[in-house]
Image: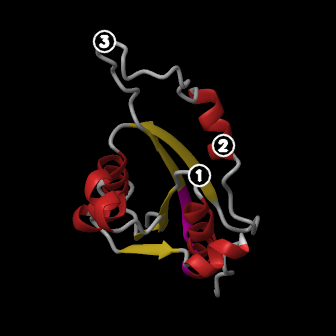
Amino acid sequence: MPSKTILFPTDFSTASDAALAHAEALAKSMGARLLIVHVEEPPLAYGGGELYYGLPEPDSERILKMLEDVRPLDPAVPFTHRLTMGDPAGEIVRIAADEQAEMIVLGTHGRTGVVRLLMGSVAEAIVRRAPCPVLIYRETAERLARGRPEPAKA
């Protein structure tokens, strides 16, 4: 019997940090492992250089180190890391299918209005295409102002 897997994508944001507590609690209660994933988007191609402002792209070693720092607090919860490159929503859905994940747990920034229209919503694309249930955790403004996530209940 294959082991249960909860897929936890992270973009290293406070929303992702807050969702990790919920992913960990679910993994513990289900006897599942956490698959902690970060999808690195391909570097942008610049045309004539006028759009390039000299901002360095984070290197893969630094991103891998950041990913390795994302881990459950409870040492009894098994986890693995995976760094991949591509379209975040597409890669997360593909990995969930390949790993036969029971669930995807992710944090969202909860953007609305014009910002969401212009930037799109990775969370929405995942919900629409995921092969399994998706739990989306959105930090409220009050919890964000306090600077820490609300603890998850197991």
Tell me the element at label 3.
loop
Across and down, in percent, residue 150 comes to 66, 80
Residue 153 is marked as none
* Rendered residue at 27%/65% (across/down): 131
Between 78 and 10, the residue placed more toward the observer is 10
Vertical order, 8 against 52 (above or below):
below
Across and down, in percent, residue 26 comes to 56, 78
Q: Closer to the camera: disc 2 or disc 3? A: 3
Q: Report if the CB atoms under discs 2 and 1 are less than 8 Å apart.
A: yes
Q: Amino acid at mark 1?
A: Phe
Find out whether residue 15 is within the magenta segment: no
Q: Amino acid at mark 3?
A: Gly
Q: Amino acid at mark 2?
A: Met
Sequence-wise, the earlier of marks 2 and 1 is: 1
Residue range in magenta is 30-35
Tell me the element at label 1.
loop
Mark 1 — residue?
12
Mark 2 — residue?
66
Vertical order, 46 against 142 (above or below):
above
- CA separation in Å, label 3 and label 1: 31 Å
Q: Report if the CB atoms under discs 2 and 3 are less than 8 Å apart.
A: no
Would you call the spot at circle 1 few (<14 residues within 10 Å), some (14-19), or many (20 or more)? Answer: some
Across and down, in percent, residue 142 comes to 62, 81
Would you call the spot at circle 3 few (<14 residues within 10 Å), some (14-19), or many (20 or more)? Answer: few
Across and down, in percent, residue 23 comes to 56, 71
Q: Residue furthest front?
A: 50
Mark 3 — residue?
48
